[in-house]
Image (cartoon, rainbow, N blue to C red):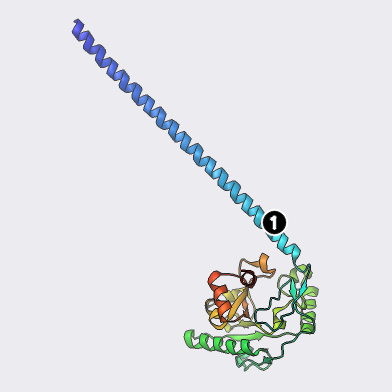
Amino acid sequence: MTISGQSRQDSVGKQLYSQSFYQTNQAATVAHLDQLAKEKLLEEERLAEEKRQEERLAQQQAKLDLESSFYENVITVSNGDSKLVLVNKNYALDSSYAPSDLVLPNVLALGHEQNKTIYLREEASQHLEQLFSAAEQEAGLIFLARSGYRSYETQVSLYQRYVDQNGQEAADRFSARAGHSEHQTGLAIDVTADSVNGQLTTEFGKTAEGIWLKDNAHRFGYIIRYLEGRESETGYQYEPWHIRYVGVEAATEIYENNWILEQYLNK
């Protein structure tokens, strides 16, 4: 082989070696970058999981704090006649309180009988009549009134019966202690329909009547007082049948923000 031929061969060899070295080095660099990317992703996932865990613990602690504060340091309200009066597990009505303007709403009750026993305050009654009428005219839905105003004494008996039947811890999740019931305000009413056989059940929330009520009650000044998923804040189970009159303006703002009454009053 001539010197020139050997030189060309050496040159080609060096090019091939250089190309091979470059490719190997490039592959190593890509692999290294891939590894770094994977490590970064794993670190981000770890941090995200830590954050989620912290949030879960905070929510659990908040729930415990809320539940432990129920019925402690109870305040007796002085504005019982206000349509925005707050009555819950920490704010109570006096045992002697009774609205002075109770009337019989002109609506249907159980059995499709004309209401003769369920009372509400006058303004709440007028708006309930409008709500029932609109449901029938707009959607062909028939609501039935089941329970409105209750006196302090009635709530004493009702709550005690539930305690006797279910124990106090269970009773506190669906029944108010006397003085702490919104029914005593004359501004709250339980409604139902034939679709749930006139019962007060969470299944009502899935019916055409329950869905319409949730989406339209605010137009008539009412709110679904105990929303689904807000049990730790209200202290009560989800009650799609329990509506509370607060006036159209407040009800609309509460509905549009998916608030509970406490949030509206504390805004």
The residue labelled by disc 1 is 61
Q: Where is residue 173 in the image (x, y as percent from the top left)?
A: 71, 70
Q: Position of residue 253 (x, y in %)?
A: 55, 74
Q: Determine the image quadrant of residue 98.
A: bottom right
Q: In this view, does 117 lie above or below 6?
A: below
Q: What residue type is labelled 1?
A: Gln
Q: In this view, does 27 lie to the left or right of 226?
A: left
**Residue drawn at the location 44% of the way across and 35% of the way down:** 34
In what element is the residue under mark 1?
Answer: helix
Q: Which of 133 and 90 lies nearest the eye of the viewer?
A: 90
Q: Where is residue 120 in the image (x, y as percent from the top left)?
A: 66, 88
Q: In this view, does 85 lie above or below 114?
A: above
Viewport quadrant of the N terminus: top left
Q: Determine the image quadrant of residue 59.
A: bottom right
Q: Is residue 129 above or below residue 73?
A: below
Residue 129 makes an appearance in the image: yes
Viewport quadrant of the C terminus: bottom right
Q: In this view, does 134 lie to the left or right of 76?
A: left
Residue 1 makes an appearance in the image: no
